[in-house]
Image (cartoon, rainbow, N blue to C red):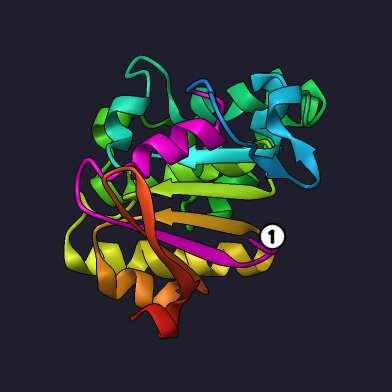
Amino acid sequence: LEKGMTLGIIGESGSGKSTILGLIQGLLPLEKGKIIINSVDIKTLSNFKLSLISQIIFQNVGSCFNPRLSVENILEEPLKIHKIVNNNEISERVEKLLSYVGLEAEYMHRYPDTLSGGQKQRVAIARALASEPKVLILDEPTSALDVIVQSKVLNLLLDIKEQFNLTYIFITHDLSVVRNIANKVVVMNKGKIEELGATNNVF
């Protein structure tokens, strides 16, 4: 997958889509083969270093947030862990991250249970951007949203991709989404790749 492109991974439940996601992010052990990002075999990287290269945005973002932390606390955590900015610049960077995803600065003081599904997804995107990754892995990121919110989040993801020159790996059941956003498509079945090619050719 070339830099700046979007790869769609599709297949029915149990076909291996989420397993690939876990392998790429170092959440599962790789028993065979290699995964190489930016000419580096990820086996040689710690999970800490790997999280600076790639980040995951999950389907059910509500379960990914500590309900006791404010949005500001959620977004400042990766900034502190990876020392992205100096401590006195953290609040300013949190505001900027929120602006990237179309949320006002006042959302810093909100808690996850006061946010709508679309707002939670935007905070999850902002958190993923905090560590300045090269690759975003999106695991069914819009399937839990209604159609109008889904469209807004997809447009936001496309804008962010262009703005930050990101590479996307997009896992979904929604063929229309893949057709509209992916340059290449992988079709999986029972743990194997059935088809791989340019989106128009596969469709």
| Residue 87 left/right relative to 70 | right
Amino acid bearing label 1: Phe
Q: Is residue 150 visible?
A: yes
Residue nearest the viewer, comparing 62 with 171: 171
Q: Secondary structure at mark 1?
A: helix
The residue that disc 1 covers is: 164
Point 67% across, 65% down: residue: 4
Q: Position of residue 7 (x, y in %)?
A: 50, 62
In magenta, the rendered stretch is 1-27
Q: Position of residue 86 (x, y in %)?
A: 82, 25
| Quadrant holding the C terminus | bottom left
Q: Is residue 21 magenta?
A: yes
Callout 1: few (<14), some (14-19), or many (20+) C-alpha neighbours within 10 Å?
few
Which of the 4 image quarters holds residue 163?
bottom right
Residue nearest the viewer, comparing 111 with 57: 57
Q: Is residue 119 above or below residue 102?
A: above
